[in-house]
Image (tube, helix red, strand yellow):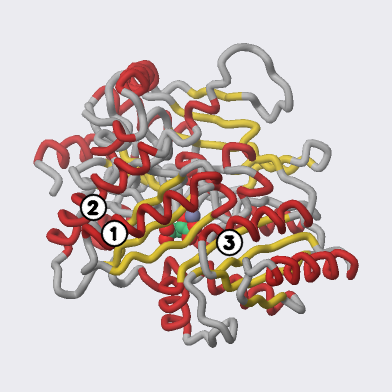
Amino acid sequence: MATNDDQQRIRKLALTCPELHLSTEADVLQSHGQDWTRFREPAAAAIAFPDSIRQVQDLVRFAEQNQLPLVPSGGRTGLSGGAVAAAGELVVSFDRMRHVLEFSEIDRTVVVEPGINTATVQQLAADKGLYYPVSFAAEGSSQVGGNIATNAGGIRVLRYGLTRDRVVGLKVVTGRGELLDLNRGLVKNATGYDLRHLFIASEGTLGLIVEATLKLVDPPVPGKVLLLGIDSMDNLMRVFAQLRSRLELSAFEFLTDRALHHVMNANRLPAPLSSVCPLYVVTEFDCPDEQTESRAMACLEECSAKGWLVDGVISQNQRQMKELWRYREGISESISHFPPYKNDLSVRVSRVPEFLRRMNRLMNEICPEFEVVWYGHIGDGNLHMNILKPETLDLQAFEARSHEISEHTYALTRELGGSISAEHGIGLLKQPWLDRTRSSVEIGLMKELKKVFDPAGIFNPGKLLPG
Ligand code: S2G
Ligand code: ZN
């Protein structure tokens, strides 16, 4: 709840920067004070809606002089509480800064404001005969500014990399209200530290992203989707290696039988295969001609003959491609009502089978009472672990129990040289465990960097970095 002091500063801000459209309406405070996480109650003092870089600079200068903590907020689809204002902060929403500023055919770049939807950028690229390959289930709601702040991944990382690989220019407002115009869309620029990469994945703790220049790529060739049923992680990795050596894969996603159960249940989908398997794969590959399709079928027959593959289906048209993707893309939404306690883990791809085998053994030992749903991006070594809250447990008790489990999860992740957050970021929810995946020296240096860019400590306090 905002204190009197917070409210006084908000009133002063409203007088100093009236064009910010400050809102303290209860429904706006509720909607814009949180993201997709449900483990913290939003408690923002107010929501600001700047619509220009200068307004953001004025707001930051005011915040620095008045010690007003700021929480940047984009599409509010975050999964680690990075955009949650739980302690009377001022939320800076970029909903009004959502325009396309420039498209360059020869540079193959588009300059956008941070509040533009990810899907809108995808559509703009398609309209120009190009492709913006950052793609995930929340793309219709997420904003590019937030995607950059968390270095969003999605299902096409296997071929196109992460959001970081799309950003060729970035304008950022620092904690002193200065405007940095970083790299300006240049392909080559060897002039010292590439500061844009510090702000990408900084989760709004070093500066506010107020403009981005994004690199577009060639449109994909016609593709096909396979949905495969497989009986072990070792075999799944063998199929991955085979398909990747013979085909141009653009995605290779996995899900367990429990994930399939929930997505079928929630969407009343028919079983995709006649066989019931412990593991499933949804993978997409370039298939410009019949020879390629024959090569894919031959590869699947070989995998089946070797006992690596139980069953499979290939899309025959665009509609079926979308239908097969639904079994993967619909999982997150299908379990969100529980709600799930999420861990977004990554290990090197070579360690995925051992990691999942040991995690399953660990879960059976320490929390057999919980249902754990797994899915994710095998090609990136990124596994999404979702512990579903049982009805018998209230949210606080469930979170506390999940934290106990996380201690074991992170110990194993660390043992295998992995990361406790592959693409969702650290935010508020994972902040207590940052030292499981980053050394004390690294964390110390990150804190020094925070002092350089945000000397008054106004940007997203309590997020990412421990106090
Ligand atoms: C995914 C989306 C959010 C979730 O589906 O790849 O990153 O449910 C996730 O973990
Ligand atoms: Zn993911």
- Residue at the extreme left of the image, as rendered: 4
Local SS, label 2: helix
The amino acid beneath tag 3 is Asn
Query: Which comes before the other along the chain, label 2 or label 1?
Result: 1
Q: Position of residue 173 (x, y in %)?
A: 45, 28
Mark 2 neighbour density, 10 Å: few (under 14) some (14–19) many (20 or more): some
- Three-letter residue code for mark 1: Met
Cα–Cα span, label 3 and label 1:
22 Å
Question: The C terminus appears in which quarter of the rendering?
Answer: top left
Asked if residue 159 lies left or right of residue 65, the reply is: right
Tell me if label 2 and label 1 are in contact, CB under 8 Å.
Answer: yes
* Residue extending farthest top: 192
- Which of 252 and 217 lies nearest the eye of the viewer? 252
Q: Which comes before the other along the chain, label 3 or label 2?
A: 3
Q: Marks 3 and 2, how far apart in space?
A: 28 Å
Residue flagged by tag 2: what amino acid is it? Ile
Q: Which residue is mark 2?
A: 405
**Snapshot quadrant of residue 368:** bottom left
The residue under the point 56% across, 43% down is 113
Q: Is residue 247 above or below residue 320?
A: above
Task: Tell me if residue 332 comes above or below residue 107 in the rendering.
Answer: below
Regarding mark 3 in the picture, which secondary structure is present there? Answer: helix
3 or 1: tag closer to the N-terminus: 3
As drawn, the label of residue 363 is 1
The residue labelled by disc 3 is 235
The label shown at residue 315 is none
Quadrant for ligand 1?
A: bottom left
Q: Determine the secondary structure under disc 1.
A: helix
Q: Residue furthest front?
A: 306
Please report the residue visible at 34 percent of the width from the left and 56 percent of the height from the top. Answer: 342
